Amino acid sequence: EAQVTQNPRYLITVTGKKLTVTCSQNMNHEYMSWYRQDPGLGLRQIYYSMNVEVTDKGDVPEGYKVSRKEKRNFPLILESPSPNQTSLYFCASSLSWRRAGTDTQYFGPGTRLTVL
Amino acid sequence: GQQVMQIPQYQHVQEGEDFTTYCNSSTTLSNIQWYKQRPGGHPVFLIQLVKSGEVKKQKRLTFQFGEAKKNSSLHITATQTTDVGTYFCAGLQVADSWGKFQFGAGTQVVVTP
């Protein structure tokens, strides 16, 4: 089954304790993104990756890191989480962004993160 | 930078009525996509519009892309309780070596039976 998976689905942590949220897709997609969703703000892109070893900042990258060492995985790293990073996080992937029709994004189930 | 504004933020609809949600970008878009997110769920792709002035229909949903490729609308006729959720537009802006998505804040739809 084609899907995007994220782990963990729920996480409560404390300020400053490094954490990683994993994202994996099994569709051989080139393009992967991380978004955070906050009430009234919609989905804001944190980082995106156009292919292996190619990443770039989205609209809200501060406090986050990513890596894309393999095509299927795109982990989100919070080196020193702070309470303002409490949010609902979604990973998404698409076949490409270069050609219309291949850029439909498939979203993972979401990770609800609380930083105390 | 690119800004995608979506209105209204909330929409209460009586079952059977029609409503429209609007999406406006400050810059010209490569294409626009619409997603639906049910309560507690994740965004699910509905449709993509690419051409200037394009209109597409999916049963009771009509999607439109403006002539200048800066605005879009989603019109739902005869609303049903299954239409409950938040509808997002997402604009894709591309250059030679990058492509960025920007989502509107969403329209949260509540349907009263």
Image (cartoon, coloured by chain):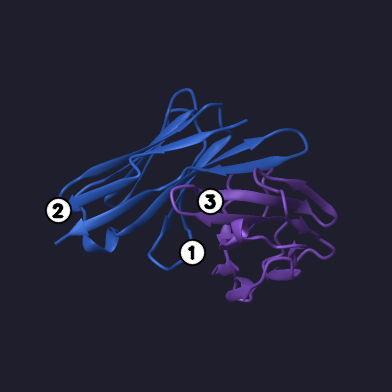
Q: Earlier in the sequence, mark 2 or mark 1?
A: 2
> In front: mark 2 or mark 1?
1
Which quadrant is home to the C terminus of chain B? bottom left
**Residue A65 point in image, percent of width and height:** 77, 57
Chain identifier matching the blue colour in the rendered picture = B
Asked whether A13 or A23 is in front, the reply is A13
Asked whether B86 or A98 is in front, the reply is B86
**Residue B24 point in image, percent of width and height:** 44, 31
The residue labelled by disc 1 is B42
Query: Label 3 amino acid?
Result: Leu
Q: Please give left or right for residue B64 compared with residue B109 in the image.
A: right
Q: The residue marked by circle 3 belongs to what chain?
A: A
The residue labelled by disc 3 is A43
Q: Colour of chain A?
A: purple
The answer to whether dots 2 and 1 both sit on one chain is yes
Secondary structure found at label 1: loop
The answer to whether dots 3 and 2 both sit on one chain is no
**Residue A35 point in image, percent of width and height:** 60, 55
- Please report contact status of discs 3 and 2: CB closer than 8 Å, yes or no: no
Secondary structure found at label 3: strand
The residue labelled by disc 2 is B16
Task: State whether residue A15 is above or below residue B19.
Answer: below
Q: The residue marked by circle 1 belongs to what chain?
A: B
- Please report contact status of discs 3 and 1: CB closer than 8 Å, yes or no: no
**Residue B52 point in image, percent of width and height:** 48, 28
Secondary structure found at label 2: loop
Q: Residues within 10 Å of mark 2 (few under 14, many from 20)?
A: some
Q: Within the image, what quadrant is residue B62 found in?
A: top left
Q: Residue at x 56, y 26 (%)?
A: B27
